[in-house]
Amino acid sequence: MEGSGYLKESDKIKLQEKELTALDGLWFVEVEKRWGYEAANQINLEVWRRCGEILVREMKKILQLKGGDLEEVKVLFGSLLELDGTTFDFESPKDQRLMLRINRCVWYENLKKAGRHTLHDCMAIDLAILPSWLKAIDPRLTFRFFKAIPKGDGCCEIMIQYEDKPAS
């Protein structure tokens, strides 16, 4: 038997997103209670680094991608963002750079709902996590922030490029 059929596929996806968010927040709070904010934050960053690497590796297998061009970067990185409901778009300038524009960040919204958005610096979290995620896609990728929702911008903008191209 392939499941009960009790839940529609769309309901399962919504519940899985909520489960992921709840698990992330609950374990963080419990670690924080026992060992303090700094320990919880360091463990959180390492978990998210490794989680992204695992997801990229699995997506490469499922989608039969190797990495190596910006179209595959869009597919792999965009797939990571889609998993949690982040809304985004990519702009592909002609110079082999990729601008990622995050229009709605579910994680930041959840931090705001929980009243914890002032405790967590989203950009610091992304600066710690994104290098390992991009390395899993293609070790030559680098990135740079231009805008950030938590800093008052209407979106986050992140330029992704190969390291042999100078950042502007």
Image: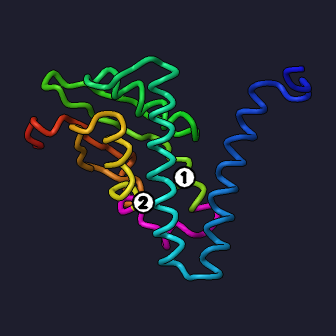
- Tell whether 129 sits left or right of 48: left
Circles 1 and 2: CB atoms closer than 8 Å: yes
Q: Report the span colored magenta.
A: 112-124
- Tell whether 11 sits left or right of 118: right
**Mark sitting on residue 107:** 1
Residue drawn where x is 32% and y is 20% of the image: 71
Q: Position of residue 105 (x, y in %)?
A: 50, 47
Count residues near mark 2 (Cα–Cα under 10 Å), then give few for <14, some for 14-19, many for 20+. Answer: some
The secondary element bearing badge 2 is classed as: helix
Residue drawn where x is 29% and y is 43% of the image: 158
Residue 84 inside the magenta-drawn segment: no
- CA–CA distance between discs 1 and 2? 9 Å
Residue 119 inside the magenta-drawn segment: yes
Q: Which residue is mark 2?
A: 122
Of the image marks 1 and 2, the number of the one nearer the N terminus: 1
Instruction: Tell me the amino acid under the disc marked 2.
Output: Cys
Q: Position of residue 130 (x, y in %)?
A: 36, 49
